[in-house]
Amino acid sequence: IHRFPLIKVRGVPLMEHIAKNWSSIWAFRPDPSDLLISTYPKAGTTWTQEIVDLLLNNGDADVSKRAPIPVRIPFLEIFSPPPIPSGLDLLQDMDPPRVIKTHLPIQLVPEGFWDSKCKVIYVARNAKDNLVSYYHFDRMNLTQPEPGPWDGYIHKFMKGDLGWGSWYDHVKGYWKEREKRNILYLFYEDMKENPRREIIRIMEYLDLSLSVDTIDHIVQLTSFKVMKDNPMANYSFIPMPVFDQSVSPFMRKGEVGDWANHFTPEQAEMFDEDYARQMEEVDIPFRSNI
Ligand code: A3P
C-alpha cells in the first residue's frame, strides 16, 4: 500500500492516481438517470449513500447486505491500485439508475452531469467537525498522505492543502450553484437532528413516495449504530487493506461537536477568525453544536 502524493489538477490537489487518470474522468458521459452524491470527504457520504440506496429499493433491507458500498455505489474518480476496479470500470457494468459518489469540487464535476440534468445531492458538514473526521481518516487511510501533527493539520485544512482541496471552496461552490443546477444541498447536522425529516427530503427530491413504515425502517437501518455494525457499510469489507481500522474505525463517532475534544480554545479562535474571512461572501447556515 502506497500513500499517494497529491498532484494539482486545475489548482485542486488530488491523489496522484486520480490526477494521472484525469482525462478519462473528465470525459465521463453520464446517463440522464444517473444520480450523483457529492461531498467534501468525511461530510456524511456513506450515510447518504445508504439512505439513497434504501430509498431507491423501497427499504429492502437486503440491499444494505448485498454488496459493499464502494461496489454498489462506485466512486467516480477512484483509480485504485489493482485488483480494485476503478469507479469508471464499475460504472460501465451497471444498469440504470446508477448512483455515483464523488468528492470533486463543483468545477471539476464532468460537464456531462450538467448537460444531462442529472440529479445531484450535496452534503455539507460544519468545518471543525469535518476537519476532525478527515484528520482521523488520514491517519487510517493508507493511500492518502500522512496527516502529520494535529496543529499542522489544522493549517493544511485552512489552506486547502488536502486531498480534494479546500473545504471552503467546496461548500461554497455547490452552494452558489444549488438553485441554478437543482442540487439538493443537505447538512450533516440536520441529518443528525432529525434523520426522518431529511430522509423525506431526499425521497421527495428523488420523486419517490414510500410508506410511513418503510421510511421508519430506513431511519433505523441508517442509524450510526446499525451502519457501524454493517460490514457492507463500515468499510471492513473492501478488497484490500487500504484502511487500517485499528488506528481509527471508519464509523468513528458520528457526532456533532466532537471538534471541542480536539481544538484548544486558542486553535478554535484562530480557526474561527480565518473562517470568517474565507466564508465572508456567503451565508451558509452551518451549525456546529446541536
Ligand atoms: P466521524 O469521523 O466524525 O465519526 P464519509 O462517509 O463522508 O467518509 O463520512 C464519515 C463520517 O460520517 C464519520 O464521522 C462517520 O462516523 C460518520 N457517519 C457515517 N455513518 C453515519 C451515520 N449513520 N450517522 C451519523 N454519522 C455517520
Image (cartoon, rainbow, N blue to C red):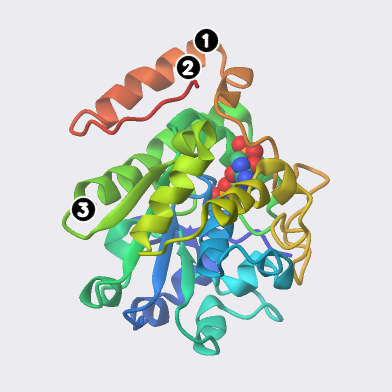
Quadrant position of residue 234: bottom right
From the top left corner, tell me how far across and down residue 164 is, in percent. 44, 54
Number of marks in the rendered image? 3
Q: How far is the residue under mark 1 from the one under mark 2?
A: 5 Å
Quadrant location, ligand no. 1: top right
Q: Which secondary structure lies at badge 2?
A: helix
Q: Taking 284 as reference, is 35 left or right?
A: right
Disc 1 residue: CB within 8 Å of ligand 1: no
The kind of residue on which mark 1 rests is: Pro
Question: Could you tell which of marks 3 and 1 lies nearer the N-terminus?
Answer: 3
Residue where numbered disc 1 is placed: 265
Left or right for 185, reference 125: left
Q: Amino acid at mark 3?
A: Glu
Please provide percent x and percent y for residue 219. Answer: 60, 47
| Element on which disc 1 rests | helix
Q: Is residue 52 above or below residue 96?
A: above
Q: In the shown orientation, is residue 226 left or right of residue 155? A: right
Q: Badge 1: how crowded within 10 Å, few (<14), some, or many (20+)? A: few
The label shown at residue 177 is 3
Q: Report the residue at 63% width, 52% height from top.
A: 217
Give amino acid for label 2. Ala
Q: Tell me: residue 191, above or below residue 101.
A: above
| Residue tagged 2 | 268
Whether tag 1 and tag 2 are in contact, CB under 8 A, the answer is yes
**The N terminus, quarter of image:** bottom right
Return the mark for residue 124: none
Of circles 3 and 1, the one toward us is 3
For the residues labelled 2 and 3, the Cα–Cα distance comes to 29 Å
